Image: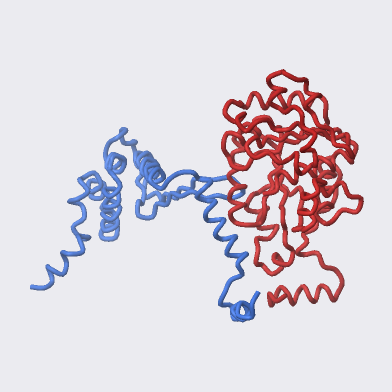
Amino acid sequence: MGKTTLTANLGIALARLGKTVAVLDADFGLRNLDLLLGLENRIIYTAQEVLATTCRLDQALVKHKQQPNLALLPAGNPRMLEWLTPEDMQTITGLLAERSDYVLIDAPAGIEQGFKNAAAAAREAIVITTPEVSAVRDADRVIGLLATMDVKPVQLVLNRVRPKMMANQEMLSVDDVTDILALPLLGLVQEDERVIVSTNRGEPLTLEDNPSPAGQAYLNIASRLCGEEIPLIDPSKKRHGLRARLINKLRKTTGLF
Amino acid sequence: MTVLDFINRLLGREKPSGTMARQRLQLVLAHDRSDLNPELLDQMRREILEVVQRYVEIDIESCDVSLETEDRVTALLANLPIKRTREFPLPIGSGSGSGIGSGSGPAALALDRGTRTDTSAQRPAAGAETSALAGPSASLVPGTTEPGDPPAGIQP
């Protein structure tokens, strides 16, 4: 849940930290990364032409205007799914890795061949899920598959966190999900209406100078990937001061408001 | 949260749904992760017991073989109380072992019931018990017959 949004925002955030980043849309069936990055009108060639060597890699790469450190390799025709092999994906990512610090692969939904292709080309993985039973169960399947494909380390991002519902215990808590999936937590992204606005515009939240809570969460994830230590704060427990603590206690015992 | 929900929560009638979500997930994931269907698990259980029985006499009644998952590691836990060790291991596919190993599902079940009645009645008679195990399962359970029988016997 939220793979493409994470890829777009993380790509921009890493580029802002001075890294060269290539993002690869591996969701050939339902490609959207170009749309979230606002690059849909500038695509000329795709991964398909690069593989067929009918064009050079730098001809196919689409540079982001505001963050030229970031380049997108667009997904080709959906029919690519029929013949694409894990080795092809490894070839493409190998080419991208030569010229960038980070290669982010946006994996397709599901655990079918498309996912396996993407995972075959990955060295490590970030699993993003929401705190809902169906999403956590799916994530567990994905984590199991990644383990068999020797992709590691695998880190977890918890998306669409609703602090109020968590405090009311009407939602799986952050600890519940990390305990069940047994993965280190890389980031917590709160439910944020700004995400929709940013996708409407094709401008990832991490482009902003004063990002909204979700944007800040993506920036923090990028910094953590670069080795910076930024504490993870569980938003459902984040209340300070005597009055706030009293309210929190009241809220926990009664489950009201 | 409605007022009714609130009242139910105060009276302890209703668990918060987050807790339910956690419990349901843990249960379903234990199954997902083991990836063994109950039939295969049962077959494996029978084969493990067969091998162990060649070396030691075990209390089949209190044997427990199950899968447990913790921290993404699934473990096969077998709890097999030993009655006594055998001086010489039985040859492969012989004695009590063959009865359990080759038996189909229901037969194995009947065997379990048979040993239960045996062990409760006469503990020291281990020889009798093994012979009973080796025999055909149907003749083994005179005490626990079909539900239709006892009333017919009592009525006259």
Q: Nearer the viewer, residue A135 or B137?
A: A135
Res B86 seen here: no
Q: In this view, which residue lies farthest toward the top?
A: A53
Res B21 seen here: yes
- The figure's colour scheme reads by chain
- Identify the hue of chain B: blue
Q: In this rendering, would A219 be left or right of B25?
A: right
Q: Nearer the viewer, residue A3 or B28?
A: A3
- Total numbered circles: 0
Q: Could you tell me residue A206's position as x and y percent?
A: 85, 47
Q: Residue at x 30, y 33 (%)?
A: B91
Q: Nearer the viewer, residue B12 or B124?
A: B12
Q: Could you tell me residue A58's position as x and y percent?
A: 81, 24
Q: In this view, which residue lies farthest toward the front?
A: A41
Q: Could you tell me residue B50's position as x and y percent?
A: 35, 41
Asked if residue A28 is positioned above or below residue A59 in the image, the reply reads below
Kindly indicate the quadrant of the structure image that contains residue A109. Answer: top right
Kindly indicate the quadrant of the structure image that contains residue A192. Answer: bottom right
Which chain did the image draw in red?
A: A
Image quarter where the C terminus of chain A lies is bottom right
Q: In this rendering, would A111 be left or right of A8?
A: left
Q: Residue at x 59, y 61 (%)?
A: B21
Q: Residue at x 26, y 54 (%)?
A: B114
Asked if residue A232 is positioned above or below residue A164 in the image, the reply reads above
Q: Could you tell me residue A228's position as x and y percent?
A: 86, 44
